[in-house]
Image (cartoon, rainbow, N blue to C red):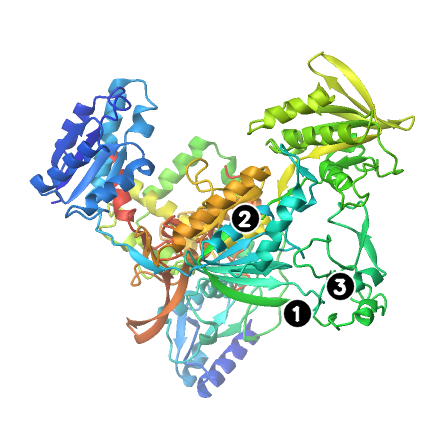
């Protein structure tokens, strides 16, 4: 017979206020196997913990039940307590009589009865608990950062500065992400490139950072401390070991395609650097527009002019594999493709209806107009400018209910810049709300209004051309009447959306996304940079829309988590993982297929069967990969897999305790 | 049919004489001309015992599970349904293709009512085909019986299943004959685990029936052996038929045992799966 102790917590008045804790403790004392039952005001307090320790010693308890708050709250507190006693930390069950009872029931009598039921179930379950012991996994102290925008750059620099090796992966040919496209940054109006390019060159020069551009994650295996990652480095067709970045090839290339970096406002060549400050500062050939590579023409001009012979049309994709202890996902965001969503704004047919990011390139000194605000259609200076906020954001009908967070400040900056640079300009901002919760943000918004920006509360319903003007028709919801504002140029502050291939990457990393594709954090408040997969962390806008200060802060936090992991030589794995009974396992691989962490594999074992000694396949759980979700246990028809700590026997006992 | 029978005897004899196979699983006459039983032919001179006629109702494939680690190859006479059963067991990792030599037999249906709803009369996988391929049937509703059941009211359905499970004698014949049942120890045979009460009553019978349906539902190859062998005539295929019909509705065309590398609908997840469970 087990020797169970039951400890009922009052949680101040949280529990005691809603149900009769004394009656719960008294009822628990009569349950089979219970040697001691008591209640106390705060079980998690120093005194409460001492009470548990004393009871274990005095009554020779071999397992305990704590009736208190959710196990997510204090299960670890009590596990730690048990480490100082003869009782194994896993001979513990928590009966959640707070969140699942006291907080949700108004009737004291019924709540008390339910609490007794919950305690009875926990007592029945703990009788079937078995001592569990942690395993230890070695840590490979090298980090992989996926995405080299400001989030990835910051995370990589922080980890590298702490003394650990980092591989920084970027799918484009240069690092820098969206931040280097921007002109000025709110609310201080410092030049975006001036503050980000030094970080870019620091990355390139850092002895602990290996930079891999034009590269994507091909596959991920392994587990925390030991991820085996295959990286595909796309063919560059330019040998960067030889190339000096002189740029001669770029001046001679005859192929012209729209420039992604300049948001389609101008063209680039097929052999190109996306922008002059690119890191690495060496060109690559875009195989989709190079005349020779698509086989349209013999061309090869770049090869002919290159004085060093760095052009290599035979270049192939490379597959590189390495082991990493931790992975930081920093894949950032994209802007919504607004044109198909907004036929009412012309759906892209008016060239003077541009996005905020296109405007950034227009106003940027290194952009296509060298910083002069000239509207795309006729290169004239726009006098009347309308800025429309929440294009694609905060609109369920357009598919996104969320706020993109940066646009309110972004549009105030745009208004300010136009009023400053174009004398006599008139700027109208259509807004739903103005959200400025950041240091010096409200002041910046005030400044834009003081500059003369006219804020009209309402959405623009339609944009159409009339007499050479773009007419923005909408409603001023404060005045309750329709408005029509004629404009020379319209700037749409479009919604942030997750990177297109994010779901594919998440599947490889066995992490999840929300309905929009933003990567899911482990806990929205308490574990915002962790994911459900140990050793995979989040930085920046891949987790949700963010501005630069928040992104940099989160990147630092992710780096700190990586450094914490790397500060140990080995990490303690949870013993609450799946275990296979090889005698029962028939090797059908149902568990292999359902495991979201790729932790179960088939393995051949020697087995003695009626027909003699044979080899047969059975499931094997990788302790490092298993996260204890129990999907395999549920899929196993024969019950050969058990989740330790939640074994079938334990759960059936709980059910029996409630139903029989 | 007699052409196939003589070809079958001929090939079985040759395979055994040449030592290419250890034994041949097929059918032989027993208890009169209108009955057969499974035959296991080990000697070339016994090959003449093999028969092929419309009374060859037993599925041959499941016997492969009784000899998972054979010394040589096992030749098996396989109709369309038997080859689907072989694919089932290959997909479940229960047998190895190299251990099996498949003598494919095109079949126009035997004395089994399930044959009226057979969409695969020709073997789907074989090492050699005996006789000519036959035309496939398409003029039937695969889930007619399920649709008929759905016409009933909830109360009528409850009563029907209650009555059916009261009849069940838990002989487990449906399990023993099923090619999707390949556990080393069936949950129903395990004691002191609490899964399946050993009591013999309609409640425990129903637990068995439902659990069986869930264990095999998305892997059922529709051979109908469970219903054929049931001594109490329970409409067992109605349960798996219902599950298969739902798999078809949720995941598109879904039929099991058509290839050895298929993945069961409920044993996998992909991002494009319908989430409309209800």
Q: Nearer the viewer, residue A327 or A217?
A: A327
Question: Hey, which quadrant is residue A548 in on the image?
Answer: top right
Residue A458 place in picture, x, y as percent: 70, 20
On screen, A307 above or below B144?
below
Instruction: Please give the chain letter of the residue carrying mark 3.
Output: A
Mark in front: 1 vs 3: 3
Give the residue at mark 1: A241
Q: Residue at x 49, y 85 (%)?
A: B14
Q: Which residue is mark 3?
A: A246
Left or right of B90: which side holds A617? left
Q: Which mark is residue A349?
A: none
Closer-to-camera residue (A315/A87): A315
Coordinates of residue A169 in the picture (x, y in percent):
58, 57
**Chain for disc number 2:** A
Residue A526: image x %, image y %?
Answer: 41, 37
Residue in view at x 24 percent, y 23 percent: A112
Q: Residue tagged by mark 2?
A: A154
Regarding residue B53, the answer to whether it shows in the image is: yes
Of the pair A456 and A157, the residue shown nearer to us = A157
Question: In this picture, is B255 found above or below A34?
Answer: below
Alpha carbon of mark 1 to alpha carbon of mark 3: how far? 13 Å
Point out the tag, 1 or 2, that comes first from the N-terminus: 2
Q: Secondary structure at mark 1?
A: loop
Name the residue at the right extreme: A467
Along the polypeptide, which appears first: circle 1 or circle 3?
1
Q: Quadrant of the C terminus of chain A?
A: top left
> Do badges 2 and 3 share one subunit?
yes
The residue positioned 19% from the left and 32% from the top of the image is A48
Residue B229 in the image: state x and y as whole percent. 39, 56
């Amino acid at each position: 017979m087990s020797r169970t102790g039951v400890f009922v917590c009052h949680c101040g008045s949280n529990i005691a206020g809603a149900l009769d804790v004394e009656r719960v403790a008294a009822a628990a004392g009569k349950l089979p196997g219970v040697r001691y039952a008591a209640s106390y005001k705060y079980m998690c307090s120093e005194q409460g913990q001492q009470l548990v320790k004393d009871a274990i010693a005095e009554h020779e308890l071999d397992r305990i039940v704590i009736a208190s708050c959710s196990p997510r709250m204090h299960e670890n507190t009590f596990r730690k307590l048990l480490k100082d006693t003869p009782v194994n930390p896993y001979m513990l069950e928590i009966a959640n009589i707070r969140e699942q009872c006291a907080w949700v029931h108004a009737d004291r009598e019924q709540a008390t009865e339910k609490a007794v039921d919950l305690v009875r179930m926990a007592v029945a379950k703990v009788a079937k608990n078995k001592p569990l012991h942690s395993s230890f996994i070695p840590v490979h102290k090298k980090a992989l950062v996926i995405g080299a925008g400001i989030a990835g750059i910051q995370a990589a620099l922080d980890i590298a500065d702490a003394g650990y090796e980092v591989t920084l992966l970027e799918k484009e040919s240069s690092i820098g992400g969206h931040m280097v496209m921007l002109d000025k940054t709110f609310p201080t109006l410092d030049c975006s490139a001036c503050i980000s390019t030094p970080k870019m060159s620091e990355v390139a020069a850092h002895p602990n950072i290996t930079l891999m551009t034009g590269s994507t994650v091909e596959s991920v295996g392994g587990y925390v401390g030991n991820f085996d990652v295959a990286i595909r480095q796309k063919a560059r067709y330019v040998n960067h070991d030889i190339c000096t970045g002189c740029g001669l090839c770029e001046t001679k290339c005859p192929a012209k395609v729209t420039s992604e970096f300049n948001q389609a406002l101008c063209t680039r060549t097929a052999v190109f650097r996306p922008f002059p400050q690119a890191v690495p500062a060496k060109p690559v050939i875009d195989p989709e527009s190079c005349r020779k590579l698509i086989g349209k023409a013999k061309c090869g001009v770049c090869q002919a002019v290159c004085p060093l012979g760095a052009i290599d049309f035979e270049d192939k994709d490379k597959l590189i594999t390495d082991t990493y202890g931790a992975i930081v996902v920093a894949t950032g965001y994209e802007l919504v493709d607004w044109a198909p969503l907004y036929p009412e704004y012309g759906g892209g047919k008016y060239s003077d209806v541009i996005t905020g990011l296109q405007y950034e390139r227009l106003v940027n000194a290194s952009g296509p107009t060298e910083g002069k605000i000239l509207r795309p259609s006729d290169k004239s200076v726009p006098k009347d400018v309308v800025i429309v906020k929440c294009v694609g954001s905060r609109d369920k009908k357009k598919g996104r209910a969320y706020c993109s967070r940066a646009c309110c400040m972004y549009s105030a900056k745009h208004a300010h810049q136009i009023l400053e640079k174009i004398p006599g300009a008139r700027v109208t901002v259509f807004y739903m709300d103005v959200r400025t919760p950041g240091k010096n943000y409200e002041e910046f918004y005030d400044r834009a209004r003081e500059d003369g920006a006219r804020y009209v509360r309402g959405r623009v319903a339609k944009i159409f051309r009339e007499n050479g003007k773009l007419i923005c028709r909408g409603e001023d919801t404060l005045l309750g009447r329709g408005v029509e504002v004629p404009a020379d140029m319209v700037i749409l502050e479009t919604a942030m959306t997750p990177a297109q291939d994010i779901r594919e990457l998440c599947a490889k990393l066995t992490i999840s996304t929300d309905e929009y594709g933003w990567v899911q954090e482990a806990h929205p408040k308490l574990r915002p940079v962790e994911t459900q997969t140990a050793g995979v962390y989040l930085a920046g806008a891949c987790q949700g829309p963010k501005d630069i200060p928040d992104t940099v802060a989160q990147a630092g936090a992710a780096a700190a988590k990586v450094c914490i992991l790397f500060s140990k030589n080995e990490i303690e794995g949870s013993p609450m993982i799946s275990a296979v009974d090889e005698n029962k396992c028939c090797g059908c691989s149902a568990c292999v297929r359902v495991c979201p962490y790729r932790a179960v594999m088939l393995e051949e074992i020697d087995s003695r069967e009626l027909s003699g000694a044979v080899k047969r396949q059975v499931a094997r759980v990788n302790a490092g990969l298993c996260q204890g979700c129990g999907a395999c246990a549920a899929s196993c028809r024969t019950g050969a897999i058990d989740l330790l700590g939640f074994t079938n026997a334990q759960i059936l006992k709980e059910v029996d305790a409630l139903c029989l | 049919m007699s052409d196939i029978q003589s070809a079958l005897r001929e090939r079985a004899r040759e395979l055994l004489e040449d030592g290419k196979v250890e034994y041949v699983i097929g059918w032989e006459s027993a208890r009169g001309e209108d009955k057969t039983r499974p035959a296991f032919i080990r000697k070339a001179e016994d090959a003449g015992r093999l028969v092929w006629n419309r009374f060859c109702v037993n599925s041959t494939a499941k016997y492969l599970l009784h000899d998972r680690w054979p010394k040589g190859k096992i030749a098996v006479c396989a109709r369309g349904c038997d080859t689907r059963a072989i694919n089932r067991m290959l997909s479940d990792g229960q047998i190895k293709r190299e251990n099996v030599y498949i003598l494919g037999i095109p079949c126009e249906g035997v004395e089994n009512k399930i044959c009226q709803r057979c969409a695969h009369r020709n073997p789907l996988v074989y090492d050699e085909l005996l006789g000519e391929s036959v035309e496939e049937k398409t003029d039937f509703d695969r889930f007619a019986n399920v649709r008929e059941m759905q016409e009933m009211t909830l109360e009528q359905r409850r009563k029907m299943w209650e009555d059916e499970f009261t009849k069940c004698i838990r002989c487990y014949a449906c399990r023993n004959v099923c090619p999707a049942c390949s556990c080393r120890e069936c949950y129903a045979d395990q004691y002191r685990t609490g899964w399946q009460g050993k009591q013999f009553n309609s409640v425990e019978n129903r637990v068995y029936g439902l659990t069986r349906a869930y264990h095999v539902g998305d892997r059922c190859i529709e051979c109908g052996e469970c219903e054929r062998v049931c001594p109490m005539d329970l409409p067992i295929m109605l349960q798996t038929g219902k599950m298969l019909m739902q798999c078809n509705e949720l995941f598109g065309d879904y039929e099991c045992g058509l290839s050895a590398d298929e993945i069961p609908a409920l044993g996998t997840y992909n991002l494009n799966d319908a989430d409309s469970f209800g």
